[in-house]
Image: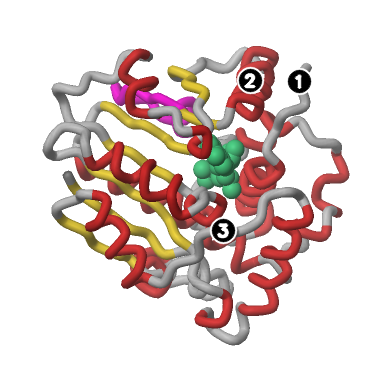
Amino acid sequence: MSTGADSTAVRTALWRALHTIVDDEPLILDDPLGLQIAGVGDDWRSRPDMDPDRTMPNRASIVTRSRAVEDELARSGLRQYVLLGAGLDTFAQRHSGTVRVFEIDQPATQAWKRERQETLDLPLPALVPVDFEAGDSWRDRVVAAGLDLGAPAFVSMLGVAMYLSPDALHDTLSQAASLASGSVMAFTTSRPIETAPPAIRPILAEASAGAAASGHPWLSLLGPDDAAALARGAGFSSVQVLTSQDLHDRYFADRRDGLSPVGGEDLVIATV
Ligand SMILES: C[S@@+](CC[C@H](N)C(=O)[O-])C[C@H]1O[C@@H](n2cnc3c(N)ncnc32)[C@H](O)[C@@H]1O
């Protein structure tokens, strides 16, 4: 088996699984499958980044972004779904409808995930290997894989923007903005650490240092206004930002267990 799993993708899959184990009902997202795909040892819960209390805000943000985007996709009624930087996302397996799914990720991570899914005998979406930093057009590659350019598509990019250089990020968004009219792109952004709520800053600083140490430095941190401007500059006609507070109000207002995504990623919804 190849060993190309992106460590950030594995970590977010484990946080989604941890949510199903340690958090109260109702779950924000019910996704234990990523844990199986990750194929980690039984001691995964003793990893420092899986401490259920200390990393609660990270876990909340990660499950919320997937839930919010899957809700937006359902609301849009669009039937083509492209996940940029899909990681160990399992929408393709959890979804029982007729949405056609295309997953794009770095070649090594995607090859590793393909092997894992084949080993587990899971149904595969269309898998399209692309490195956004290498100057390849993900749009051309996904069209070659079967995306219908004559129909609008829903595109997500969750937890990826921060790892991209500004040029690659702009280019990646611009390609989505050139899809059919009515297409929607949803992507998350992380704010500069010094602008996060004070209580969250140490967690973000630790996450940033860990990311850099594992070879995935944060290259693009954006506040909501800059994120919206980036989307408009990439060519989208209508742009809305759901801040982490908006996401809290939408999904967490009635919870009493302290779980909240506030201070985590904001979600940009941009329409072609
Ligand atoms: C934090 S993970 C998020 C994965 C998934 N979207 C989720 O929500 O769990 C970041 C993902 O972006 C991908 N990624 C990072 N840089 C990339 C690049 N230059 N080209 C393509 N994918 C990239 C990684 O391989 C990884 O799967």
Residue at x 14% of width, y 22% of height: 150
Q: Is residue 25 visible?
A: yes
Q: Which image quarter is the C terminus in? A: top left
- Please name whichever residue, 145 or 12, is drawn nearer the observer in this view of the structure: 145
Identify the residue position indicated by label 2 in the image: 111
- Earlier in the chain: of badge 3 and badge 1, it is 1
Q: Residue at 68% across / 57% down in the picture?
A: 22
Residue that carries the numbered disc 3 in the rendered image: 219
Tags 1 and 2 touching, CB below 8 Å? yes
Going from N to C along the chain, the mark reached first, 1 or 2, is: 1
Residue 2 numbered mark, or none: 1
Which percent across, then down, holds residue 158? 46, 48
Q: Amino acid at mark 2?
A: Ala
Q: Mark 1 CB in 8 Å range of ligand 1?
A: no
**Separation of disc 1 and disc 2 at Cα?**
7 Å
- Point out the quarter of the image occupied by ligand 1: top right
What's drawn in magenta, residue-wise?
Answer: 91-103
Corner quadrant of residue 108: top right
Point 33% across, 28% down: residue: 139
- Which callout, 3 or 2, points to the residue nearer the camera? 3
Q: Position of residue 77 (x, y in %)?
A: 19, 36
SS for callout 3: loop
Question: From what the image shows, is residue 192 above or below residue 1?
Answer: below
Q: Residues within 10 Å of mark 3 (few under 14, many from 20)?
A: some
Is residue 30 visible to the viewer in this orientation of the structure? Answer: no
Disc 3 residue: CB within 8 Å of ligand 1: no
